Image (tube, rainbow, N blue to C red):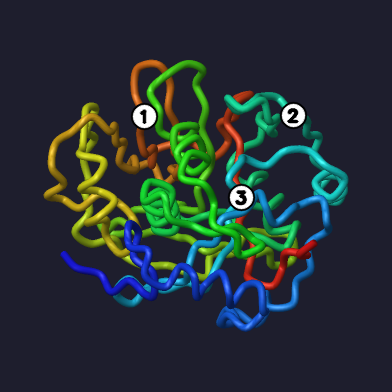
Amino acid sequence: MSHKIQPLIPGNTDGLEEIAKQLLEGTSPEPDDKEEKHVIIPVEFTPEDFVLLQGRSHGNYSYPNLFVNMYRLGLNKSVETAAKNLRYSIANTAKEKNGRDYIGDINWEQGLKLNLSLGGRTLSPRQYVDFLGLLKSGNAVDGNGTKIPKKKLTEVFNEIVQVREPWRAEWLDADFKYLNEKLLIYSQHKLVNGNLDASYKKELEGCLIQDATPGIDFDYWLKNATIEGLPPANNSKGKLYYWCPDKDNNSVAGFGADSGWAGLLCYRNPSFTYSSLGVRLALPQGALAKK
């Protein structure tokens, strides 16, 4: 299975310097989504905390340039205001290994709505695969166009996938439904009259539809994920756990790890909460206020 990936392939440094130059000069391409184009994010979100995920095309699925926070969403004034407007009671309930606090005890809907209220989004499984591949490559720039040290990218990568205590996880933007025995994905949600509305709806094809505990090969998944980011049906065996969507039409996606496993969870009940289950903010290009 092959996917057209433009313009920067994980592990390839070609074009990295030009991307940094474009960011600093403000000349890099604008996202196609005009609704997100002119969103301005408060200065509490610093460019140094974000990694540029270049817009890509996978078959008929594509997305624009995104700035993805290297850390799960933590409490600040902007987040507090968004939560208040949504009538959510939130708090920092967990820490990353580097000591950064982040918000947990939020369900899937709350996580997605928080990010959308901040002018951002939650990564879809496809975007998340590309994000993990970028971290693993060791070649990335931050929101200022500055190349991020490989050691830092490795630390961020390990925070997500390393098999160790404590249990930590994050929600992804994917809701799964079975219709006439066909498995559908609902993703790229937006807020419409206060409700989540999926702008991407498609039947899933060629993906693994049975649990693998363990496991699937992590690197094979990164390189051969389906258009929607799920493991392909022929994914090599390995140590990465995978739970496929249940047939209860009540399954959403997340990624987690603990002392016994790391894995992609596509069977989570959207109402599930846990203190160390948070969400990661991704922002459209042009949203970060550069210092």
Residue at 23% x, 62% y: name it: 205
Foreground residue, 5 or 59? Answer: 5
Q: Which mark is residue 69?
A: 3
**For discs 1 and 3, the disc positioned in front in the rendered view:** 3
Element type at mark 3: strand
Q: Amino acid at mark 1?
A: Ala
Q: For numbered disc 2, what is the local secondary structure?
A: strand
- As rendered, which of 172 and 138 lies closer to the eye? 138
> Where does residue 17 sit, x and y in percent of width and height?
49, 70
Residue in view at x 70 percent, y 24 percent: 93
Q: Quadrant of the C terminus?
A: bottom right
Could you tell me which quadrant the N terminus lies in?
bottom left
**N-terminal label among 1 and 3:** 3
Circles 1 and 2: CB distance less than 8 Å? Answer: no
Q: CA distance from mark 3 to mark 2?
A: 16 Å
Q: What residue would you read off at disc 2? A: 92
From the image, tell me which residue sits under label 1. 262
Q: What count of labels does the image hold?
A: 3
Q: Residues within 10 Å of mark 2 (few under 14, many from 20)?
A: some
Q: Amino acid at mark 2?
A: Asn
| Mark 1 neighbour density, 10 Å: few (under 14) some (14–19) many (20 or more) | many
Above or below 51: residue 61: below
